[in-house]
Image (tube, rainbow, N blue to C red):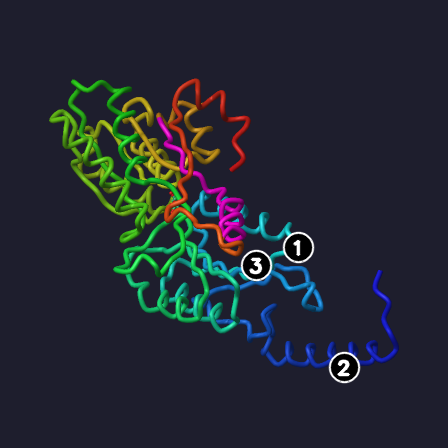
């Protein structure tokens, strides 16, 4: 229960009046003391830490997280994991920025975090390239950068402390191997591929892993590939185009994530075919809607990709702070789900 002293009550009233006037004048102030951006494309930032008087004893570990956006169920689950992990731990203050899928917004957010002198930066990089300059600025400011879920291509790996995320090449290999296991290696299979965001490490590596296995089997062939940008809507749109051009010549779909696979399922049904039966579908992520689609016989396989990276990020930051040498790549353990195994696992899926 807070006890207001007379003097501070006056101060509070004055401050409330100032804030009210500034909000009415359109210069709203966000949690970080800056002007809230009203331009739609600018990153949306929020400061989720409980307020404190920030005395030395209260000194929190301030973490700036630049998130890609909210393009998929997987992404939402990752965001929630980070907010839950850091929001429920009083030793941390989380500054969260949603880049709305734009690299320039992520670079802006990182520069803001540097100017705010945060203790650590977490970055889920929307694409692999174009990060050298801003990562050099973070290094010059002596702020460790932790890559989350996707990685970057840089000439100097000291520009980031660790990458916490999955082995996307292995995910792609597992998707192809499971497809061949369930369809039969001797069957003639024409595949259409729904790729993730152009330039993203998750898309590049899932394509590479899958292609390696397909190239080793002359009966399997990727006849069409196109980006669906990891979204359900775009996945449906691209699948509609594939069906229009190749219809009955398609035996299988490889979707780089569940959201695009769910869009493809809709397109296949509207085309008049039975998804999961007429056309075999394998995707990646392991979200609950994918498990439900497997239960309903519309999706055949989902390759798990763990989005619940909050605890690993928190531990990595604490270890770094304590001088512990970190792995350059902190990998997630993952599985492959289909058939009864997926149905049995569904009740326990948390995202
Ligand atoms: C994977 C992540 C991918 C997911 C998609 O780590 O980057 O981005 O597979 C998400 O669902 O959009």
- 10 to 93, vertically: above or below: below
User: Percent x, y for residue 19?
Assistant: 68, 77
Marks 3 and 1 sit apart, C-alpha to C-alpha, by: 10 Å
Name the mark nearer the viewer: 2 or 1: 1
- 263 to 41, vertically: above or below: above
Marks 2 and 1 sit apart, C-alpha to C-alpha, by: 30 Å
Residue at image coords 51%, 71%: 38
Left or right: 8, with 251 as reference point: right
Left or right: 89, with 273 as reference point: right
**Quarter of the N terminus within the rendering:** bottom right
CB under 8 Å between discs 2 and 3: no
Q: Earlier in the sequence, mark 2 or mark 1?
A: 2
Q: Give whichever of 249, 329 is nearer the camera.
A: 329
Name the mark nearer the viewer: 2 or 3: 3
Q: Which mark is residue 14?
A: 2
User: Percent x, y for residue 278?
Assistant: 28, 23
User: Percent x, y for residue 175?
Assistant: 30, 31
Residue at image coords 43%, 28%: 293
Q: Secondary structure at mark 3?
A: strand
Number of other residues with Cα within 10 Å of mark 3, as a class: few under 14, some 14 to 19, many 20 or more: many
Rendered-image quarter of ligand 1: top left
Which residue is most to the left?
Answer: 218
State the residue position of label 3.
Answer: 94
- 138 to 198, vertically: above or below: below
- 78 to 334, vertically: above or below: below
The region drawn magenta spans: 301-319
Asked if residue 315 is among those painted magenta in the image, a careful observer would answer: yes
Number of other residues with Cα within 10 Å of mark 1, as a class: few under 14, some 14 to 19, many 20 or more: few
State the residue position of label 1.
Answer: 90
């Amino acid at each position: 229960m807070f006890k207001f002293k007379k003097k501070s009550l006056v101060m509070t009233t004055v401050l409330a009046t100032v804030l009210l006037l500034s909000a009415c004048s359109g210069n709203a102030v966000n949690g970080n003391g800056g002007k809230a951006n009203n331009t739609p494309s600018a990153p949306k930032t929020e400061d989720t830490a409980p307020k404190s008087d920030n005395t030395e004893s209260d000194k929190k570990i301030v973490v700036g997280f630049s998130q890609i956006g909210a393009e998929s169920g997987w992404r939402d689950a990752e965001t929630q994991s980070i907010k839950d992990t850091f929001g429920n731990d009083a030793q941390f203050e989380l500054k969260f920025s949603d880049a709305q899928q734009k690299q320039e917004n992520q670079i802006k957010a990182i520069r803001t975090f540097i100017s705010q002198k945060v203790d650590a930066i977490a970055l889920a990089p929307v694409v692999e390239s174009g990060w050298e300059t801003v990562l050099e600025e973070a290094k010059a400011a002596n702020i460790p950068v932790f890559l989350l879920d996707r990685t970057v291509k840089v000439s100097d790996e000291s520009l980031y402390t660790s990458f916490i995320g999955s082995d996307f090449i292995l995910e792609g290999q597992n998707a192809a191997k499971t497809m061949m296991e369930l369809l039969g290696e001797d069957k003639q299979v024409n595949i259409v591929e729904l790729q993730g965001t152009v330039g993203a490490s998750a898309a590049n590596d899932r394509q590479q892993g899958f292609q390696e296995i397909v190239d080793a089997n002359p009966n399997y062939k990727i006849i069409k590939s196109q980006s669906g940008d990891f979204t359900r809507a775009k996945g449906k749109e691209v699948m509609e185009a594939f069906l229009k051009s190749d219809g009955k010549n398609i035996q299988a779909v490889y979707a780089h994530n569940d959201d695009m696979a769910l869009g493809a399922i809709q397109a296949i049904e509207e085309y008049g075919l039975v998804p999961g039966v007429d056309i075999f579908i394998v995707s990646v992520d392991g979200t609950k809607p994918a498990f439900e689609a497997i239960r309903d016989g519309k999706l055949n396989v989902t390759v798990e990709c763990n989005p619940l990276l909050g605890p690993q990020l928190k531990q990595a930051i604490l270890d770094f702070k304590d001088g512990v040498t970190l792995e350059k790549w902190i990998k997630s353990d993952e599985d492959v789900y289909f058939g009864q195994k997926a149905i049995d696992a569904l009740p326990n899926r948390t995202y």
